Amino acid sequence: MKLKYLLILFLLPIFLFNSCKREEDRIFDTNATVRITEAVQNAYTVLQGNKAGWMMKFYPSKNQEFGGYTIFTKFISNEKVSIASDPIAGVETSSYAVVAESGPVLTFNGYNKSIHWFSEPGKDNGGIGPDDSGMQGDFEFIVLKATADSVVLKGKKTGSHLVMLPLKNEEFESMSKSYQDATIKFNEFTVYTLETGGNKVVTLDYDSDYRVFNNPNDPASESMSFRIIPGGLDFYKPYTIAGKSFDRLDYVEPTSGYKYGYYTDKDKTFKIVPIATPLNVLLKSKRWSMSYNNIGPTGKIYWDRAKIALKANGIVVNNAYIGKSFSENGLFYVLQNGVVSGGITHYIDLVEGTDDQVYIELEGYAVGNFSGAHWSGGINNITTPFNGRTFKITSDGTPNPTSITLTDIGIPTNTYKVFLKDINDPFNN
């Protein structure tokens, strides 16, 4: 009997401890839930608390290989946010939420091109980055800190840290517009040269789809990733050119020696100079829209054949392009009212010793979700008068033309006037 009582006395503290521990766990769980709820509410309060809005530097990829952008946000209510970003014209309002996960997460859950463009597949964003992942940007962010002076975010996908800084007064409208205008001005040029001491000049490695410079004089140097800002360029971190470290370059207005101005460091150690883009480079570097009414008699023969075949095979052509798309060169199409987007790659070779001639030849790789059935169903006729031909390119003489004309050197009636602006229903325009 004594042994029985002793055993009970021995086990009683253990039962009491476990009972207390379970009670403490329940209290801890409740407190964790309360803390997350409070953090979510705090994020809502802070985001909406600054009526002027917020600005953040945004490098979509964690490796910065696509360069940087600037995004402006104004949180109107618990559901609505207005967003502007420098590569996309205007301001768009959409939905957002702050949701409770392991912590508060800011999600831009309603489509808004000003931010979702960075996460679209390359086949949808104009060909920047891989077809399936594009620039790999985030649109959902863990809120690490939310105070009136800054909101610190971490991309759920990339793990990249971003900081939203508060705007004042009407800066959301005025600054977003000024950044968009600066981007338009910068994008007028697709060729930039680097001038260093002793008037040494080299053309920088630069793809106009990517905000990154590479110095061919120094192959071992890092790629220099930057944002376009009013009055200059802001770099991701300090880089070095000609022995000079810099993280910003200021724009200098045109002079007699520099028709389009230039960008330079504060000590004017070197210059990055925009150059009027050669017409053949311009054709190769952008996507140009084609239409039946803007081609010559030779081209019309083949487009007429295409139209008959396409109709017989139930293929609808919404847009037709030549130049660059999907990070490739060739002829590209939007078909079946947007269900199909892609095309066939072509070599577009710059004719040596010229700045206005190209040689075009079928390479033959399908991109996007374009298939052999589309090719043999009539699209091949559109390609025929381009294949194995050399074209001279002319324009209106401006440094950044919005339309150019290709004229076949061997067949003068084989001409194409193409446009940067999309032409829908190309067989009837």
Image (cartoon, rainbow, N blue to C red):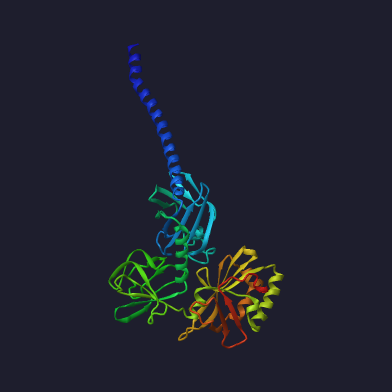
Residue found farthest to the top = 1
Instruction: State the residue in front, 404 or 13.
Output: 404
Asked if residue 183 lies left or right of residue 386, the reply is left
Residue found farthest to the front = 169
Residue 412 in view here? yes
Residue at image point 57% right, 75% down: 419
Asked if residue 420 lies left or right of residue 2, the reply is right
User: Looking at the picture, how far across and down is residue 332, in whole percent?
Assistant: 58, 71
Residue found farthest to the left = 243
Residue 121 in view here? no
* Residue 121 against residue 185 in the figure, above or below: above
Instruction: State the residue in front, 263 or 28.
Output: 263
- Res. 340 image quadrant: bottom right
Residue at image point 56% right, 87% down: 409
Instruction: State the residue in front, 176 or 30.
Output: 176
Instruction: State the residue in front, 415 or 269.
Output: 269
* Residue 161 against residue 104 in the figure, above or below: below
Residue at image point 61% right, 79% down: 384
User: Looking at the picture, how far across and down is residue 380, in whole percent?
Assistant: 63, 75
Residue at image point 32% right, 16% down: 6
